[in-house]
Amino acid sequence: MSGRSDRNHNVHHASRYSVVMTGEVDVMLHSQLLRSDGQEDLCLAVYQPSNGAERMTAILADVVSPLEGETEVHGNVSFTGDYVLRAAATAARCGGGVAILHSHPFGSGWQRMSQHDKDAEASFANIVREITGLPLVGLTLAGSSDTWSARFWSRGVGRKVAPEWCESVRVIGDRLAVSWNPDLRPPPSTGANQVRTASCWGSRMQADIARLRILVVGAGTLGMDVAVRLAATGVQTVGVLDFDSAQLINLDRLIGATLLDVLLYRSKLEVTSRLLDQNATALDFRPEFIEGSICEPSQLARALDFDLIFCCVDDHPWPRSVINTIAYTDLIPVIDGGIHIDAFADGGGLRNATWRSHVLRPGRPCMACNGQIDLGKVNVDRAGLLDDESYIANLPHAEQPQGQNVAVLAVGATASLLAQFVSFVAAPAGMGEPGPLRYSLSTHWLEHVEATARENCPVEKSVLAGDRRLLLVGGHVVARQNILRRQQAASHPLIKVARVIDDAFSLLRMFLTRAIAAFQAD
């Protein structure tokens, strides 16, 4: 690949980079770049930026196919400056950036760059940055393995300036396919405690799953269990986002939390942290705990740094709408679901229980189209009225107990979410995620829910918007009040001393585990 210009420019850079595209765009690019005669080819594309707290992601949105004379194939491939200018003008009109994509037809795995490749991309990085205000992104498709590699030209241009390499390129279709940069995200070693897990889908798939950055939003009945299962499976980075406290009322289903946690005013994050430490099998386990609400801009930014999200919040529509939206605007797939228990109002028994699960991504109906969220209640929830007992008391059926749940049934909902996860990332028998599922306890009937996207769904029409997304985010008063109350209660001298003693016992247990493991290893 060679270019026909020479520019220099310095641009800002994030600490981490990635590229993501839909399965549809991936198929289109394969058709464009992999020629039947085995020669390299090239095309340009428009991307939308998605900036998290630490990671900048380029969301490939539209392919700008070359016009006659704008590219020339001669073993390698060259392209004209007019082609770049046309793509940059197209990108600027929609607030996007430009990506240069070319193929290595016989390449395999993550591709490095020849000097010709570097010169071609570097020579246009400055002009693209001047026109669009965004870094030029380069991608290479390795034809033998169908894997991508990518880099951002964000620090400058010229022969002496190296690009910022991406940590991954993700393709979101009926399964999640990831091309990993082995320098930035090397495959982890499989320990003896993961042998049986890896034997289920092979060491390569185990390495792919382990490298995913997975965020669990909500550390309640489902979220805490999901996080522990992911850590036990060997996932290196499990993030948990929550602001709530362990309470007496949820000890009957918050498996792992204790009465002492309640008495010491432990947050659900603290409980989850302890459980993940005890159950993680990755040799390099790096959990992330985020105290706050997904509705707050700073916490939303943290969420955008992850590859996949489990939505395990309760039925509050505000946080669910935020998570629902970024599955489409930012191409961060979301695994969502929950349990609904239908009890007789007079306490006369259990009528039924159902649990739902689905993957939210382009090509699948969003939560609203799937009947799992009422967007009309988002502003009511944002105003805090769904946490106001006087408001709730005036709602229809308010006399009936709300939020029924029980540990022996909640595990079924957890299993359904995790089964969707395995289908999405491991694709058993080559089949990806199955679409929305619903299980009815009374009849023991599992059905595929025939949900379809509404014609004018505002969520799915905002697909690939990235930083142009429209979200109802802001200060989450209920979350901040909850955190403040817990901090004030935990500041009592007796509670502080009791916490120190409890923490000391936990540290002693950890020390004993490591000391005995080291002794037996010798």
Image (cartoon, grey):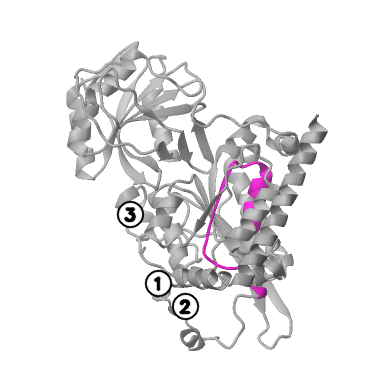
Of marks 2 and 3, the one in the foreground = 2
Q: Amino acid at mark 2?
A: Leu
The residue tagged 3 is 469
Give the residues in magenta: 224-248
Q: Which residue in the structure is indicated by mark 2? A: 386
Nearest to viewer (mark 1 / mark 3)? 1
Location of residue 255 with respect to 197 vertically, above or below:
below
Alpha-carbon span between mark 1 and mark 2: 9 Å
Quick check: marks 2 and 3 in contact, CB under 8 Å? no
Residue 454's disc number: none
Could you tell me which quadrant the C terminus lies in?
A: top right
Tell me whether circle 1 and circle 2 mark residues in contact (CB < 8 Å): no
Label 2 and label 3: CA atoms lie apart by 25 Å
Tell me which label, 1 or 3, sits earlier in the chain: 1
Q: Which mark is residue 382?
A: 1
**432 sits left or right of 470 in the view:** right
Q: Nearer the viewer, residue 252 or 377?
A: 252
Are the residues at dot 1 and dot 3 in contact (C-beta closer than 8 Å)? Answer: no
Residue 115 in which image quadrant: top left
Disc with the residue nearer the chain's start (2 vs 3):
2
Query: Tag 3: Cα neighbours inside 10 Å, few (<14), some, or many (≥20)?
Result: some
Measured from the top left, where is residue 401 in percent x and y?
62, 82
